[in-house]
Amino acid sequence: MTNEQNNKYNLEERTAKFGEEIIKFCKNFPRNEVTKPIINQLIKCGTSVGANYCEADDAESKADFRHKIGICKKESRESKHFLRMSAVAVPEVKDQARKLWTEAKELNLIFNSIYKKVK
């Protein structure tokens, strides 16, 4: 397997990369009354996915792990929402937003699956 294929299954790396891409994406936004809150929220939720996954990885109990994975699930879903809003606010970033939205969706599906399996 190539490094890129390995990283697809390495959630710590994948969520960190997602956060990095969200930051790069937001750096190119024009700043105005509409985009400032979208940028702020998108950076918060997009980078939170990886931070909470790291927390889950070091969980103190099964319940703590499930709780942190639940947060990852919520933050990845919120990322999808703000990526959609960003495409409306700045139409010229629509294609890049769509790629990030797809990654947020995949992460959300992964975290949903993990969450359901941990009882």
Image (cartoon, rainbow, N blue to C red):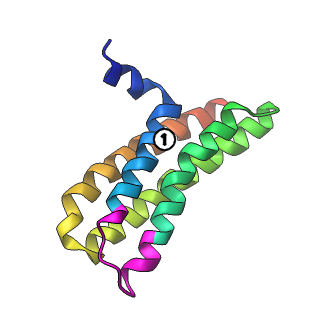
Horizontal and vertical percent for residue 91? 20, 72
Residue 92 vertical placement versus 57 (above, below): below
Q: Residue at x 58, y 33 (%)?
A: 114
Q: Residue at x 39, y 28 (%)?
A: 8
Q: Residue at x 78, y 31 (%)?
A: 62
- Secondary structure beneath dot 1 equals helix
| Residue 102 included in the magenta stretch of the image | no
Asked whether 11 or 105 is in front, the reply is 11
Q: Residue furthest bottom?
A: 33
Q: Look at the image and tell me in which quarter the N terminus lies.
A: top left
Residue 63 vertical placement versus 88 (above, below): above
Horizontal and vertical percent for residue 112? 54, 41
Please name the residue that numbered disc 1 is placed on: 16
Horizontal and vertical percent for residue 105? 40, 47
Q: Look at the image and tell me in which quarter the C terminus lies.
A: top right
Q: Residue at x 33, y 59 (%)?
A: 25
Residue 56 vertical placement versus 20 (above, below): above
Horizontal and vertical percent for residue 113? 54, 34
Badge 1: few (under 14), some or many (20 or more) residues near its Cα, within 10 Å?
Answer: some
Within the image, what quadrant is residue 18 found in?
Answer: top left
Residue 34 vertical placement versus 78 (above, below): below
Q: How many marks?
A: 1
Tell me which segment is drawn in magenta: 26-39
| Residue 32 included in the magenta stretch of the image | yes
Q: What's the amino acid at mark 1?
A: Ala
